[in-house]
Amino acid sequence: DLKSELSELDKKHFLHPTSSIKMQQESGPAYIFVKGRGIYLEEISGETFIDGMSSLWNVNIGHGREELGRVANEQMNTMAFSSAFSTYSHEPAIRLAKKLSELTPGDLNVCFFTSGGSESNDSAIKMARHYWKLKGKPERKKILSRKLAYHGVSMGATSATGIPEFHEMTSSLAPDFVYAPSPNARSWSEIEDVDLTCIDETIKIIEKEGPETIAAFIMEPIQGAGGMIIPPNGYLKAMREICDKYGILLIADEIITGFGRTGKMFGVEHWDVTPDMMTVAKGITSGYIPLGAVIFSDRIHQELIELSTGTLFHGFTYSGHPTACMVGLKNIEIIENENLVQNTEQRGIELSKGLTKLEEKHWSVGGIRNKGLLGAFELYQDCTSKKRFDPSLGVAKRVVDECLKRKLIVRPITYEGTDTIAIAPPLISTKEEIEQIVSIFSDAVSVVESQLNG
Ligand code: PLP
Protein backbone atom coordinates (compact mmCIF):
# COMPACT_ATOMS: atom_id res chain seq x y z
CA ASP A 1 0.00 0.00 0.00
CA LEU A 2 0.93 3.69 -0.22
CA LYS A 3 2.09 3.91 3.40
CA SER A 4 4.57 1.04 3.06
CA GLU A 5 5.81 2.40 -0.25
CA LEU A 6 6.37 5.85 1.26
CA SER A 7 7.97 4.33 4.38
CA GLU A 8 10.53 2.45 2.33
CA LEU A 9 11.37 5.58 0.31
CA ASP A 10 11.52 7.64 3.50
CA LYS A 11 14.05 5.23 5.06
CA LYS A 12 16.25 5.32 1.97
CA HIS A 13 16.17 8.99 1.03
CA PHE A 14 14.88 11.26 3.77
CA LEU A 15 17.17 12.28 6.62
CA HIS A 16 14.73 13.63 9.20
CA PRO A 17 15.42 16.78 11.20
CA THR A 18 16.02 16.19 14.90
CA SER A 19 15.54 12.44 14.72
CA SER A 20 17.15 9.21 15.78
CA ILE A 21 18.90 8.11 12.58
CA LYS A 22 19.07 4.49 13.73
CA MET A 23 15.45 4.24 14.79
CA GLN A 24 14.38 5.92 11.57
CA GLN A 25 16.27 3.24 9.64
CA GLU A 26 14.82 0.40 11.64
CA SER A 27 11.18 1.36 11.76
CA GLY A 28 10.62 4.14 9.22
CA PRO A 29 8.21 6.99 9.94
CA ALA A 30 5.51 6.13 12.46
CA TYR A 31 3.09 8.69 11.06
CA ILE A 32 2.64 10.13 7.60
CA PHE A 33 0.25 13.05 7.71
CA VAL A 34 -1.82 13.99 4.69
CA LYS A 35 -4.24 16.68 5.77
CA GLY A 36 -4.74 19.40 8.37
CA ARG A 37 -7.97 21.07 9.50
CA GLY A 38 -8.37 23.27 12.56
CA ILE A 39 -6.53 21.68 15.48
CA TYR A 40 -6.52 18.28 13.74
CA LEU A 41 -4.07 16.40 11.53
CA GLU A 42 -5.15 13.41 9.48
CA GLU A 43 -2.82 10.47 9.05
CA ILE A 44 -2.54 8.48 5.84
CA SER A 45 -4.43 5.60 7.49
CA GLY A 46 -7.41 7.95 7.93
CA GLU A 47 -6.95 8.41 11.69
CA THR A 48 -7.32 11.93 13.04
CA PHE A 49 -5.05 13.39 15.73
CA ILE A 50 -5.23 16.52 17.86
CA ASP A 51 -2.16 18.59 17.03
CA GLY A 52 -1.46 19.38 20.67
CA MET A 53 1.86 21.06 19.88
CA SER A 54 0.58 23.18 16.96
CA SER A 55 3.11 20.97 15.11
CA LEU A 56 6.37 22.72 16.12
CA TRP A 57 4.70 25.38 18.31
CA ASN A 58 4.04 27.26 15.08
CA VAL A 59 0.59 26.56 13.58
CA ASN A 60 -1.01 29.26 15.72
CA ILE A 61 -4.15 29.84 13.63
CA GLY A 62 -4.65 26.11 13.07
CA HIS A 63 -4.53 24.07 9.89
CA GLY A 64 -6.39 24.45 6.61
CA ARG A 65 -7.03 28.19 6.42
CA GLU A 66 -7.55 28.59 2.70
CA GLU A 67 -7.20 32.40 2.80
CA LEU A 68 -3.47 31.93 3.27
CA GLY A 69 -3.26 29.70 0.23
CA ARG A 70 -5.25 32.26 -1.74
CA VAL A 71 -2.96 35.21 -0.95
CA ALA A 72 0.10 33.07 -1.65
CA ASN A 73 -1.40 32.06 -4.98
CA GLU A 74 -2.23 35.66 -5.89
CA GLN A 75 1.21 36.93 -4.94
CA MET A 76 2.94 34.07 -6.78
CA ASN A 77 0.96 34.83 -9.88
CA THR A 78 1.65 38.56 -9.63
CA MET A 79 5.29 38.50 -8.55
CA ALA A 80 6.37 35.39 -6.67
CA PHE A 81 9.75 36.83 -5.90
CA SER A 82 11.98 39.80 -6.39
CA SER A 83 15.03 40.95 -4.49
CA ALA A 84 14.96 43.24 -1.48
CA PHE A 85 18.74 43.69 -1.53
CA SER A 86 20.23 47.13 -1.55
CA THR A 87 17.91 49.62 -3.17
CA TYR A 88 15.28 47.15 -4.45
CA SER A 89 12.02 46.89 -2.57
CA HIS A 90 8.42 45.70 -2.80
CA GLU A 91 5.10 46.35 -1.11
CA PRO A 92 4.60 43.02 0.74
CA ALA A 93 7.82 43.45 2.78
CA ILE A 94 7.14 47.15 3.41
CA ARG A 95 3.58 46.48 4.60
CA LEU A 96 4.60 43.59 6.85
CA ALA A 97 7.48 45.60 8.34
CA LYS A 98 5.02 48.40 9.14
CA LYS A 99 2.54 45.92 10.66
CA LEU A 100 5.20 44.34 12.86
CA SER A 101 6.30 47.75 14.08
CA GLU A 102 2.69 48.43 15.18
CA LEU A 103 2.33 45.08 16.93
CA THR A 104 5.61 44.99 18.83
CA PRO A 105 6.04 46.92 22.10
CA GLY A 106 7.89 50.20 22.64
CA ASP A 107 10.08 51.55 19.88
CA LEU A 108 10.68 48.21 18.16
CA ASN A 109 9.94 49.63 14.75
CA VAL A 110 12.43 48.41 12.16
CA CYS A 111 12.44 44.93 10.59
CA PHE A 112 15.04 42.72 8.99
CA PHE A 113 13.53 39.61 7.39
CA THR A 114 14.77 36.01 7.39
CA SER A 115 13.28 32.60 6.62
CA GLY A 116 13.11 31.21 10.14
CA GLY A 117 14.13 31.32 13.78
CA SER A 118 17.76 30.24 13.53
CA GLU A 119 18.43 32.78 10.81
CA SER A 120 16.73 35.46 12.91
CA ASN A 121 18.89 34.70 15.94
CA ASP A 122 22.11 34.54 13.93
CA SER A 123 21.16 37.86 12.36
CA ALA A 124 20.47 39.45 15.75
CA ILE A 125 23.79 38.17 17.10
CA LYS A 126 25.70 39.53 14.10
CA MET A 127 23.84 42.84 14.22
CA ALA A 128 24.66 43.24 17.93
CA ARG A 129 28.35 42.73 17.20
CA HIS A 130 28.17 45.00 14.15
CA TYR A 131 26.54 47.69 16.26
CA TRP A 132 29.35 47.65 18.82
CA LYS A 133 31.97 47.56 16.09
CA LEU A 134 30.48 50.67 14.52
CA LYS A 135 30.53 52.30 17.95
CA GLY A 136 34.26 51.70 18.12
CA LYS A 137 33.97 48.85 20.62
CA PRO A 138 34.76 45.66 18.68
CA GLU A 139 35.78 44.01 21.96
CA ARG A 140 32.09 43.90 22.89
CA LYS A 141 31.42 40.66 21.06
CA LYS A 142 30.44 38.01 23.60
CA ILE A 143 26.89 36.74 23.55
CA LEU A 144 25.40 35.83 26.91
CA SER A 145 22.65 33.23 26.77
CA ARG A 146 21.16 30.84 29.31
CA LYS A 147 21.31 27.20 30.24
CA LEU A 148 18.38 25.26 28.76
CA ALA A 149 17.91 27.98 26.12
CA TYR A 150 16.96 26.85 22.64
CA HIS A 151 17.76 29.31 19.88
CA GLY A 152 18.06 27.08 16.80
CA VAL A 153 20.63 25.05 14.92
CA SER A 154 22.64 27.37 12.67
CA MET A 155 26.15 27.97 14.00
CA GLY A 156 25.44 31.09 16.05
CA ALA A 157 22.07 29.83 17.25
CA THR A 158 23.54 26.43 18.21
CA SER A 159 26.24 28.21 20.17
CA ALA A 160 23.68 30.36 21.98
CA THR A 161 21.61 27.25 22.74
CA GLY A 162 22.21 26.10 26.30
CA ILE A 163 21.18 22.45 25.93
CA PRO A 164 24.36 20.32 25.79
CA GLU A 165 22.70 17.71 23.53
CA PHE A 166 22.60 20.26 20.72
CA HIS A 167 26.33 20.91 21.07
CA GLU A 168 27.12 17.26 20.35
CA MET A 169 26.67 17.78 16.60
CA THR A 170 29.66 20.02 16.34
CA SER A 171 33.15 19.48 17.68
CA SER A 172 33.58 23.20 18.24
CA LEU A 173 31.07 25.91 19.03
CA ALA A 174 31.36 29.43 17.69
CA PRO A 175 33.67 31.54 19.87
CA ASP A 176 32.57 34.16 22.39
CA PHE A 177 29.41 32.57 23.79
CA VAL A 178 28.88 32.59 27.54
CA TYR A 179 26.10 30.92 29.54
CA ALA A 180 24.14 32.16 32.53
CA PRO A 181 21.83 30.02 34.69
CA SER A 182 18.17 29.60 33.82
CA PRO A 183 15.62 30.40 36.56
CA ASN A 184 14.42 26.81 35.94
CA ALA A 185 11.15 27.32 37.86
CA ARG A 186 8.97 24.26 37.29
CA SER A 187 5.73 24.99 39.10
CA TRP A 188 3.41 27.86 39.99
CA SER A 189 4.88 28.05 43.47
CA GLU A 190 8.45 28.15 42.17
CA ILE A 191 7.42 30.89 39.76
CA GLU A 192 5.77 32.91 42.51
CA ASP A 193 8.19 32.29 45.39
CA VAL A 194 10.78 34.12 43.42
CA ASP A 195 14.12 32.43 43.84
CA LEU A 196 16.23 35.01 42.11
CA THR A 197 19.65 33.59 42.93
CA CYS A 198 20.12 33.03 39.21
CA ILE A 199 20.13 36.81 38.77
CA ASP A 200 23.01 37.19 41.23
CA GLU A 201 24.83 34.37 39.44
CA THR A 202 24.30 36.14 36.12
CA ILE A 203 25.74 39.39 37.50
CA LYS A 204 28.78 37.46 38.76
CA ILE A 205 29.29 35.94 35.30
CA ILE A 206 29.01 39.36 33.63
CA GLU A 207 31.54 40.85 36.05
CA LYS A 208 33.92 37.94 35.68
CA GLU A 209 33.81 38.11 31.87
CA GLY A 210 33.97 41.92 31.91
CA PRO A 211 30.80 43.81 30.94
CA GLU A 212 32.74 45.72 28.29
CA THR A 213 33.28 42.41 26.43
CA ILE A 214 29.57 41.48 26.22
CA ALA A 215 27.57 42.56 23.17
CA ALA A 216 24.17 41.15 24.01
CA PHE A 217 22.09 38.96 26.29
CA ILE A 218 19.65 36.71 24.43
CA MET A 219 16.70 35.02 26.14
CA GLU A 220 13.36 33.41 25.43
CA PRO A 221 10.78 35.16 27.66
CA ILE A 222 9.53 31.63 28.37
CA GLN A 223 12.04 28.88 27.67
CA GLY A 224 10.35 26.47 25.28
CA ALA A 225 12.19 23.43 23.96
CA GLY A 226 14.51 23.36 27.00
CA GLY A 227 11.63 22.60 29.39
CA MET A 228 8.77 25.11 29.15
CA ILE A 229 10.17 27.29 31.87
CA ILE A 230 8.22 30.40 32.91
CA PRO A 231 10.51 32.90 34.67
CA PRO A 232 9.73 34.11 38.17
CA ASN A 233 7.96 37.46 38.23
CA GLY A 234 10.59 40.14 38.43
CA TYR A 235 13.20 38.18 36.50
CA LEU A 236 12.73 39.85 33.10
CA LYS A 237 12.61 43.34 34.59
CA ALA A 238 15.74 42.62 36.59
CA MET A 239 17.54 41.36 33.47
CA ARG A 240 16.48 44.49 31.55
CA GLU A 241 17.94 46.63 34.34
CA ILE A 242 21.15 44.62 34.43
CA CYS A 243 21.55 44.98 30.66
CA ASP A 244 20.99 48.74 30.96
CA LYS A 245 23.44 49.06 33.82
CA TYR A 246 26.21 47.27 31.92
CA GLY A 247 25.32 48.63 28.47
CA ILE A 248 24.46 45.14 27.15
CA LEU A 249 21.86 44.84 24.37
CA LEU A 250 18.81 42.73 25.22
CA ILE A 251 17.56 40.33 22.53
CA ALA A 252 14.18 38.67 23.19
CA ASP A 253 13.73 35.43 21.25
CA GLU A 254 9.95 35.42 20.74
CA ILE A 255 10.04 32.63 18.18
CA ILE A 256 7.67 30.46 20.22
CA THR A 257 6.10 33.13 22.43
CA GLY A 258 5.23 35.58 19.64
CA PHE A 259 1.91 36.08 17.88
CA GLY A 260 -0.49 35.32 20.69
CA ARG A 261 0.82 32.02 22.01
CA THR A 262 0.92 33.15 25.66
CA GLY A 263 -2.30 35.18 25.70
CA LYS A 264 -0.48 38.42 24.82
CA MET A 265 0.77 39.30 21.36
CA PHE A 266 4.37 38.90 22.62
CA GLY A 267 5.73 37.17 25.72
CA VAL A 268 7.66 40.19 27.06
CA GLU A 269 4.34 42.04 27.47
CA HIS A 270 3.55 39.88 30.53
CA TRP A 271 6.42 41.55 32.35
CA ASP A 272 6.30 44.93 30.68
CA VAL A 273 9.80 44.76 29.25
CA THR A 274 10.97 46.08 25.89
CA PRO A 275 14.08 44.49 24.40
CA ASP A 276 16.50 46.21 22.02
CA MET A 277 15.88 43.53 19.42
CA MET A 278 13.17 40.92 19.10
CA THR A 279 13.47 37.78 16.98
CA VAL A 280 10.35 36.13 15.57
CA ALA A 281 9.45 33.26 13.19
CA LYS A 282 6.99 30.32 13.53
CA GLY A 283 3.68 32.04 14.40
CA ILE A 284 4.40 34.97 12.05
CA THR A 285 2.93 32.81 9.26
CA SER A 286 1.53 30.01 11.46
CA GLY A 287 3.91 27.75 9.56
CA TYR A 288 2.12 28.11 6.22
CA ILE A 289 5.37 29.33 4.65
CA PRO A 290 8.86 29.89 6.10
CA LEU A 291 9.46 33.41 7.42
CA GLY A 292 11.26 35.10 10.29
CA ALA A 293 12.32 38.58 11.33
CA VAL A 294 14.50 40.61 13.66
CA ILE A 295 12.79 43.75 14.87
CA PHE A 296 15.11 46.55 16.05
CA SER A 297 14.44 49.52 18.26
CA ASP A 298 14.42 52.96 16.68
CA ARG A 299 17.33 53.84 18.94
CA ILE A 300 19.57 51.08 17.52
CA HIS A 301 18.40 51.86 14.01
CA GLN A 302 19.20 55.56 14.40
CA GLU A 303 22.66 54.81 15.70
CA LEU A 304 23.28 52.40 12.82
CA ILE A 305 22.24 55.11 10.36
CA GLU A 306 24.54 57.67 11.99
CA LEU A 307 27.55 55.40 12.31
CA SER A 308 27.49 53.23 9.20
CA THR A 309 29.57 54.24 6.24
CA GLY A 310 29.64 51.17 3.99
CA THR A 311 27.44 48.25 3.05
CA LEU A 312 25.62 46.06 5.56
CA PHE A 313 27.08 42.75 4.40
CA HIS A 314 24.27 40.63 5.73
CA GLY A 315 21.21 39.47 3.79
CA PHE A 316 19.59 36.21 2.77
CA THR A 317 18.27 35.62 -0.74
CA TYR A 318 14.87 35.24 0.89
CA SER A 319 15.07 38.25 3.25
CA GLY A 320 11.63 39.75 2.72
CA HIS A 321 10.29 37.08 0.34
CA PRO A 322 7.16 38.75 -1.15
CA THR A 323 4.97 35.65 -1.07
CA ALA A 324 6.01 34.81 2.51
CA CYS A 325 5.33 38.42 3.58
CA MET A 326 1.81 38.34 2.09
CA VAL A 327 1.08 35.10 3.96
CA GLY A 328 2.41 36.72 7.14
CA LEU A 329 0.12 39.71 6.69
CA LYS A 330 -2.94 37.52 6.15
CA ASN A 331 -2.04 35.35 9.14
CA ILE A 332 -1.73 38.42 11.39
CA GLU A 333 -5.05 39.72 10.04
CA ILE A 334 -6.71 36.45 11.10
CA ILE A 335 -5.10 36.59 14.57
CA GLU A 336 -6.45 40.12 15.00
CA ASN A 337 -9.88 39.78 13.38
CA GLU A 338 -10.70 36.57 15.22
CA ASN A 339 -9.40 37.86 18.58
CA LEU A 340 -7.10 34.88 18.89
CA VAL A 341 -4.92 36.57 21.50
CA GLN A 342 -7.92 37.05 23.79
CA ASN A 343 -9.14 33.55 22.97
CA THR A 344 -5.75 32.19 24.00
CA GLU A 345 -5.85 34.05 27.28
CA GLN A 346 -9.29 32.56 28.05
CA ARG A 347 -8.30 29.04 26.95
CA GLY A 348 -5.20 29.44 29.08
CA ILE A 349 -7.36 29.95 32.17
CA GLU A 350 -9.25 26.76 31.30
CA LEU A 351 -6.03 24.85 30.62
CA SER A 352 -4.73 25.98 33.98
CA LYS A 353 -7.89 24.68 35.72
CA GLY A 354 -7.61 21.40 33.83
CA LEU A 355 -3.97 20.94 34.79
CA THR A 356 -4.84 21.70 38.42
CA LYS A 357 -7.38 18.86 38.39
CA LEU A 358 -4.84 16.58 36.73
CA GLU A 359 -2.34 17.35 39.48
CA GLU A 360 -4.93 16.70 42.20
CA LYS A 361 -5.98 13.39 40.68
CA HIS A 362 -2.59 11.82 39.91
CA TRP A 363 0.17 11.05 42.40
CA SER A 364 2.88 11.43 39.72
CA VAL A 365 1.77 14.79 38.30
CA GLY A 366 3.34 17.95 39.70
CA GLY A 367 4.87 21.19 38.49
CA ILE A 368 1.92 22.31 36.37
CA ARG A 369 2.24 25.68 34.69
CA ASN A 370 1.09 27.62 31.63
CA LYS A 371 0.84 31.06 30.09
CA GLY A 372 -2.01 31.09 27.62
CA LEU A 373 -1.69 28.02 25.43
CA LEU A 374 1.91 27.31 26.30
CA GLY A 375 1.89 24.82 29.14
CA ALA A 376 3.54 21.84 30.75
CA PHE A 377 3.51 19.45 33.67
CA GLU A 378 6.16 17.32 35.32
CA LEU A 379 6.04 13.68 36.29
CA TYR A 380 7.68 12.81 39.59
CA GLN A 381 8.24 9.60 41.46
CA ASP A 382 7.44 11.66 44.56
CA CYS A 383 5.86 15.07 44.06
CA THR A 384 6.48 16.25 47.62
CA SER A 385 10.23 15.70 47.57
CA LYS A 386 10.36 16.30 43.79
CA LYS A 387 12.16 13.01 43.36
CA ARG A 388 12.48 12.20 39.68
CA PHE A 389 11.90 8.85 38.05
CA ASP A 390 14.88 6.82 36.95
CA PRO A 391 15.45 8.13 33.39
CA SER A 392 15.75 4.55 32.10
CA LEU A 393 12.01 4.14 32.82
CA GLY A 394 11.27 6.70 30.08
CA VAL A 395 8.17 7.87 31.92
CA ALA A 396 7.53 11.04 29.88
CA LYS A 397 7.85 9.14 26.63
CA ARG A 398 5.44 6.49 27.90
CA VAL A 399 2.85 9.14 28.75
CA VAL A 400 3.30 10.71 25.30
CA ASP A 401 2.89 7.29 23.66
CA GLU A 402 -0.34 6.71 25.61
CA CYS A 403 -1.54 10.15 24.44
CA LEU A 404 -0.72 9.18 20.85
CA LYS A 405 -2.77 5.97 21.25
CA ARG A 406 -5.63 8.29 22.22
CA LYS A 407 -4.94 10.52 19.20
CA LEU A 408 -3.26 13.43 20.92
CA ILE A 409 0.16 14.64 19.81
CA VAL A 410 2.24 16.20 22.61
CA ARG A 411 5.92 16.37 23.35
CA PRO A 412 8.18 14.90 26.06
CA ILE A 413 11.12 17.01 27.28
CA THR A 414 13.73 15.10 29.24
CA TYR A 415 16.86 17.26 29.42
CA GLU A 416 18.63 17.14 32.79
CA GLY A 417 16.69 13.99 33.68
CA THR A 418 13.27 15.65 33.85
CA ASP A 419 10.00 14.05 32.73
CA THR A 420 8.21 17.07 31.31
CA ILE A 421 5.17 16.99 29.05
CA ALA A 422 4.71 20.13 26.93
CA ILE A 423 1.40 21.26 25.49
CA ALA A 424 0.75 24.05 22.97
CA PRO A 425 -2.42 23.56 20.90
CA PRO A 426 -3.46 26.03 18.18
CA LEU A 427 -4.86 29.36 19.39
CA ILE A 428 -8.25 28.57 17.83
CA SER A 429 -8.84 25.72 20.32
CA THR A 430 -12.25 25.69 21.98
CA LYS A 431 -13.07 25.13 25.66
CA GLU A 432 -14.28 21.61 24.80
CA GLU A 433 -11.08 20.81 22.95
CA ILE A 434 -8.96 21.93 25.91
CA GLU A 435 -11.08 19.72 28.20
CA GLN A 436 -10.62 16.82 25.81
CA ILE A 437 -6.84 17.28 25.84
CA VAL A 438 -6.74 17.30 29.65
CA SER A 439 -8.98 14.25 29.80
CA ILE A 440 -6.63 12.36 27.44
CA PHE A 441 -3.70 13.39 29.67
CA SER A 442 -5.54 11.93 32.63
CA ASP A 443 -6.22 8.60 30.90
CA ALA A 444 -2.64 8.40 29.63
CA VAL A 445 -1.14 9.16 33.05
CA SER A 446 -3.48 6.60 34.70
CA VAL A 447 -2.16 3.83 32.45
CA VAL A 448 1.48 4.72 33.08
CA GLU A 449 0.92 5.09 36.84
CA SER A 450 -0.67 1.67 37.04
CA GLN A 451 2.30 0.17 35.14
CA LEU A 452 4.68 1.87 37.59
CA ASN A 453 2.68 0.69 40.61
CA GLY A 454 2.48 -2.82 39.28
N1 PLP B 1 14.22 30.03 19.00
C1 PLP B 1 13.27 29.35 19.65
C2 PLP B 1 12.79 29.85 20.97
C3 PLP B 1 12.72 28.20 19.07
O1 PLP B 1 11.79 27.49 19.74
C4 PLP B 1 13.18 27.78 17.80
C5 PLP B 1 12.60 26.56 17.16
O2 PLP B 1 12.02 25.73 17.80
C6 PLP B 1 14.18 28.51 17.17
C7 PLP B 1 14.67 29.64 17.80
C8 PLP B 1 14.72 28.10 15.85
O3 PLP B 1 13.83 28.35 14.84
P1 PLP B 1 13.92 27.57 13.44
O4 PLP B 1 13.73 26.12 13.76
O5 PLP B 1 12.83 28.19 12.62
O6 PLP B 1 15.27 27.85 12.88
Image (spheres, grey):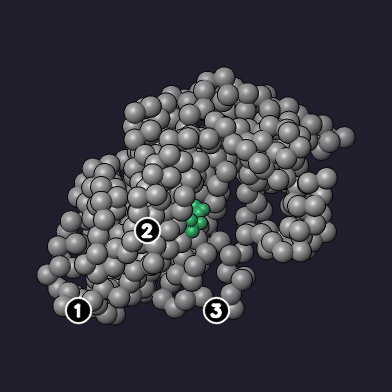
Task: Name the N-terminal-most of marks 2 and 1.
Answer: 2
Cα separation, mark 3 vs mark 1, equals 32 Å
Amino acid at dot 1: Gly
Amino acid at dot 2: Phe
Q: Residue at x 34, y 28 (%)?
A: 337
Q: Which residue is mark 2?
A: 81
In this picture, residue 335 sits left or right of residue 421: left
Amino acid at dot 3: Ser
Cα separation, mark 2 vs mark 1, equals 26 Å
Residue 299's x, y, as percent? 17, 59
Q: Please, is residue 292 above or below residue 156 in the view?
A: above
Residue found at the far left of this picture: 306
Q: What is the crowding at mark 2: few (fewer than 14 residues within 10 Å), some, or many (at least 20)? A: some
Residue found at the far front of this picture: 77
In the image, which is nearer the foreground, mark 2 or mark 1? 2
Task: Name the N-terminal-most of marks 3 and 1.
Answer: 3
